């Protein structure tokens, strides 16, 4: 039976509009790299969540008969350790899988803290303007004047080395990007008719900022949060490599690189695999960010 098209009272044929999620996915899926990045990221999340069941050994389990054993396909390797072992006999594959949990958790917490603080400050600066805007933005300019890793190093040196302090330092270095982005969006939206109508209807500043204006600023925020996620993972790995982030024996990828520096010439696998894990993770997240940018911005959608 043929489908009967819907028509409006004037007789014009009306086509059903797909749901927002389906429409978003149709544009996102046009970017093949973004789809591949999403698949890789989902796999990493799965490994991080179920690391205790997926990893063949505990991350701190030591095998004293297998110090610096090569990967299974290399000469001298064993099927017991697919990616070899480190200098104290710990399985590299198990530590990499558990390291995904640490690295992704760091990225999530850093972005969440930076996003929360940045959104609040950006809304306040853009909505109230005046001296409040000036003070907030000058502080953000001072933070942005320093390289993010250098500023994080200084803050961790003051707070003390450790994973928790590294997360706080990285969140503070990332939040100026969210502040500037939200402030610019608020300045563009605050004079539009829907905001004026809500103000005339009696909406207070809090409602106007968080219920009226903020939802219309979410698209650029989502893209910025995704890209900041990859930066957070990179900076956390750098802090771990410098001994200012996660401390041994935690299997964080940057810390694993730091522990294996002296073996780089005679045991290439202890350096290569953590570096590849960081590379693949950051690349996958950046590809997702590109796809989100194309799908959420109508000007960048492919015809």
Image: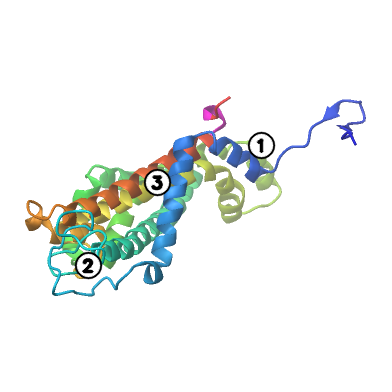
| Residue 49 at x, y percent in the picture | 43, 65
122 relative to 100, above or below: above
**Which of the two residues, 218 or 119, is positioned nearer the viewer here?**
218
Q: Residues within 10 Å of mark 1 (few under 14, many from 20)?
A: few
The residue carrying mark 2 is: 162
Q: Of helix, strand and loop, which one carries label 1?
A: helix
Mark 3 vs 1: CB contact within 8 A = no
51 relative to 257, above or below: below
**Which of the two residues, 101 or 119, is positioned nearer the viewer here?**
101
Among numbered discs 3 and 1, the one appearing first in the sequence: 1
- Numbered badge on residue 193: 1
Q: Residues within 10 Å of mark 2 (few under 14, many from 20)?
A: some
Q: Is residue 136 visible?
A: no
- Does residue 105 appear left or right of residue 30 in this picture? left
User: Magenta residues, as a range?
Assistant: 296-300
The residue carrying mark 3 is: 285
Among numbered discs 2 and 3, the one appearing first in the sequence: 2
């Amino acid at each position: 039976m043929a489908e009967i098209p819907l028509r409006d009272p004037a007789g014009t044929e009306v086509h059903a509009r797909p749901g927002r999620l389906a429409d978003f996915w149709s544009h996102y899926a046009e970017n093949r790299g973004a789809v591949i990045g999403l698949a890789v990221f989902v796999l990493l999340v799965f490994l991080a969540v179920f690391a205790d069941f997926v990893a063949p050994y505990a991350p701190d389990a030591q095998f004293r008969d297998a110090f610096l054993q090569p990967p299974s396909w290399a000469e001298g390797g064993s099927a017991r350790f697919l990616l070899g072992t480190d200098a104290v006999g710990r399985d590299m594959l198990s530590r990499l899988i558990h390291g995904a949990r640490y690295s992704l958790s760091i990225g999530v917490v850093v972005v969440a803290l930076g996003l929360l603080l940045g959104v609040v400050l950006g809304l306040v600066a853009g909505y109230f303007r005046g001296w409040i805007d000036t003070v907030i933005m000058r502080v953000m300019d001072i933070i942005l004047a320093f390289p993010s890793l250098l500023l994080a190093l200084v803050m961790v040196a003051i707070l003390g080395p450790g994973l928790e302090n590294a997360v706080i330092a990285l969140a503070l270095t990332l939040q100026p990007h969210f502040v500037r982005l939200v402030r610019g969006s608020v300045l563009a939206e605050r004079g539009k008719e829907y905001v004026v109508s809500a103000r005339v209807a009696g909406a207070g500043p809090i409602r106007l900022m968080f219920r009226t204006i903020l939802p219309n600023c979410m698209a650029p925020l989502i893209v910025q949060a995704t890209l900041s996620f990859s930066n957070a993972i990179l900076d956390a790995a750098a802090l771990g490599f410098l001994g200012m982030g996660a401390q041994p024996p935690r299997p964080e990828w940057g810390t694993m690189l730091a522990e294996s520096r002296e073996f780089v010439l005679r045991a290439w696998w202890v350096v290569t695999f953590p570096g590849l894990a960081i590379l693949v993770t950051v690349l996958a997240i950046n590809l997702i960010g590109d796809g989100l940018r194309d799908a959420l911005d109508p000007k960048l959608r492919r015809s």
